[in-house]
Amino acid sequence: MKSKLSGWQSLKAHNAVARAIKKGDLEKQPCCRCGNEKSIAHHEDYDKPLDVMWLCTPCHKQRHKELKETIWAKKTLN
């Protein structure tokens, strides 16, 4: 379960992306993995709201799966 803090950070980051696109400061890109034109902004770090990875929905789901597996692997090693 996400904390309220990460929910707010996520919302702020996504709003920053939307504003930057609207202003022309950020350009939406195709998925960086498969080239699909229908992509969304993925944040690896909400403290860097305009540092995004453009991913389509399937690739976005895969990226979150990879991140969860990485976290799980780190926990089992400790």
Image (cartoon, grey):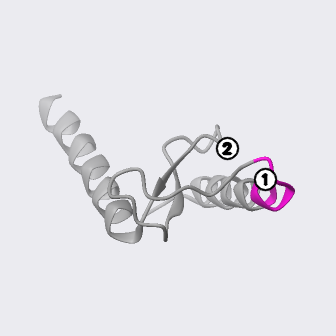
Residue for point 81% across, 53% down: 24
Q: Which residues are magenta?
A: 19-25
Q: Is residue 70 above or below residue 42?
A: above
Toward the viewer: 23 or 19? 23
Disc with the residue nearer the chain's start (2 vs 1)? 1
Give the tally of numbered discs: 2
Residue for point 21% across, 37% down: 75
Q: Which three-letter amino acid code belongs to the residue tagged 2? A: Leu
Q: Which three-letter amino acid code belongs to the residue tagged 1? A: Ala
Q: Which mark is residue 53?
A: none
SS at mark 2 in the image: loop
Mark 2 Cα-neighbour bin, 10 Å: few <14, some 14–19, many ≥20: many
The percent position of residue 78, horizontal first and vertical second, equals 17, 28
Identity of the residue furthest to the right in this view: 23
The percent position of residue 45, horizontal first and vertical second, equals 54, 40
Toward the viewer: 20 or 76? 20
Q: Main secondary structure of the magenta part?
A: helix
* Residue located beneath label 2 in the image: 50
Q: Which mark is residue 20?
A: 1
Residue for point 31% across, 47% down: 67
The percent position of residue 44, horizontal first and vertical second, equals 48, 43
